[in-house]
Amino acid sequence: MRSQSTAGFLGAVVAAVALAAAFIYGPSPSQLRNPTQPAAVQAAPAAEAAPAAPVPRGPVIREVPNN
């Protein structure tokens, strides 16, 4: 029974640490009530940029001469 008591105590310690980390690193209640607006909504773009050239996909296969 001694090992079961020790395991229960260690489980409670781990649970307490996990709960404390959730409170410390989680969002505050004010962040949940007032979410921030996306950047696109806040500032209008001045002009649209020209589309970029398409990026080649996949491996580039070149012919290699057999000497």
Image (cartoon, rainbow, N blue to C red):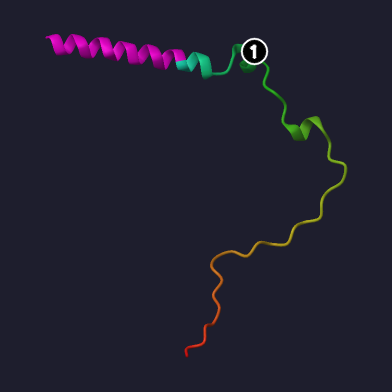
User: Which residue reaches farthest right?
Assistant: 46
What is the magenta range? 1-20
Q: Give coordinates of residue 67: x percent, y percent.
A: 47, 90
Q: Residue furthest left?
A: 1
Going by the image, does 12 lie left or right of 21? left
Residue 58 or 64: which is nearer the viewer?
A: 64
Residue at 87 percent of width and 46 percent of height:
47
User: What's the residue type where badge 1 is placed?
Assistant: Ser
Residue plotted at (88% across, 42% down): 46
Relative to 9, residue 35 above or below:
below
Residue 5 coordinates in the image, percent (x, y): 19, 9
What secondary structure predominates along the stretch shown in magenta? helix
x then y, percent, for residue 1: 11, 9
Residue 52 as seen in the image, left or right of residue 14: right
Above or below, comparing residue 64 to residue 56 in the picture: below
Residue at x 72% of width, y 26% of height:
37
Residue 43 counted in the magenta span: no
Residue 59, compared with residue 35, is above or below; it is below
Q: Few, some or many C-alpha atoms within 10 Å of disc 1 (few <14, some 14-19, many ≥20)? A: few
Q: Residue at x 59, y 14 (%)?
A: 28
- Left/right placement of residue 34 relative to residue 12 reads right
Residue 13 placement: quadrant: top left
- Measuring from the top left, give residue 53's x and y in whole percent: 73, 62
Tell me the residue that label 1 is attached to.
Answer: 30
29 vs 61, nearest the viewer: 61
Which residue is at the far front?
A: 67
**Label 1 element class:** helix
